[in-house]
Image (tube, rainbow, N blue to C red):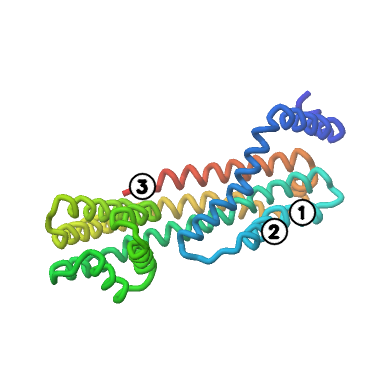
Amino acid sequence: MMSYIVANEYIFIPLLAGTVFLFSYLNFDRILNFLHEKSLGSREEVLRLMDLMFVDTNRSKVTAAMLLMSFGLGGLVFLVAWPNLFAGAFFGALVTVIGWSIPKLVVTSLWQSRCSRIVDQMVDGLTIMANGIKSGLSVTQSMERVIENMGGPLGQEFGLVLKKIRLGMTLEESLNEFADRVPQQDVQMFVTAINILKETGGNLAETFQTIVTTIRERQKIHKKIKAMTQMATTQALIITMVPFVLLGVFALVDPAYVRPLFTSVLGWVALFLILFLQVLGGVLMKKIVTIKV
């Protein structure tokens, strides 16, 4: 009975449409909030991360670019699939959902790379600060030496800290904002050490050297873990790509064999399940081989 309903498009399509309508009607508020979060909410997160990376942004241009990547590409897919309304709506909606998620994923990846680079630069930056403290300079003067001798994101962050201090903010407040902008354990350790030792007294130069040693040891462990999990990551990538490669081979060798996947409702459902399970499997494998240090 079920196979007959799925195979008969005149029954399956109205039944599926009715089910989608009923589900949408009963969960209208949740769906609306979800769409708002994934579209305009994603835009706000993208703008926030770009601001944290000191990238000048134009709100209207970012909005236009995200709409073009999501609804623009989705509409293009719908027009390509025309006059097949069901396939066009299904794959157009899928491309739209993927399109509005890509900018946030890309910008988040760039922001995380920047945070990692800041931690890497802290090894040299804290060494410079430790030498400055030993020669009698203050914390802010030592930061100025870091800015003079180093570029990159650490110099930008220290420059912003010094600008806020000149505008009347205390050293503790400006450093706490720095820790909020770069949520890394090593940055938190650096900020906490300065704030505590400034109140209680202590050897800042020696503390900075200890932090440098800790960062170096953590980087060694991270590189070792990355080398150990590299094979598992490669295997996960290969396993994820195998179904798509086989589908391409079958399409070249015997197109009629795979044509029902793209021309029938049952085939579209199967393609959706394949994509969903492949993405789910890829995410789970990535979580398994990702070890936080």
Sequence-first tag of 1 and 3: 1
Q: Residues within 10 Å of mark 3 (few under 14, many from 20)?
A: few
Foreground: disc 1 or disc 3: 1
> Seen in the image, is 140 located left or right of residue 266?
left
The dot on residue 68 is: 2
Q: Is residue 273 above or below residue 52?
A: above
Task: Indicate the quadrant where residue 178 lies.
Answer: bottom left
Residue labelled with disc 3? 291
> Callout 1: helix, strand or loop?
helix
Disc 1 marks which amino acid?
Answer: Gly
Residue at 74% of width from left, 44% of height from top?
90
The answer for how far apart the CA atoms under marks 2 and 1 are is 9 Å
Whether residue 278 is visible to the viewer of this picture, yes or no, is: yes
Residue labelled with disc 1? 75
> Seen in the image, is 281 located left or right of residue 213?
right
Which residue is most to the front?
Answer: 168
Disc 2 marks which amino acid?
Answer: Leu
The dot on residue 259 is: none
> Callout 3: helix, strand or loop?
loop
Residue at 69% of width from left, 58% of height from top?
68
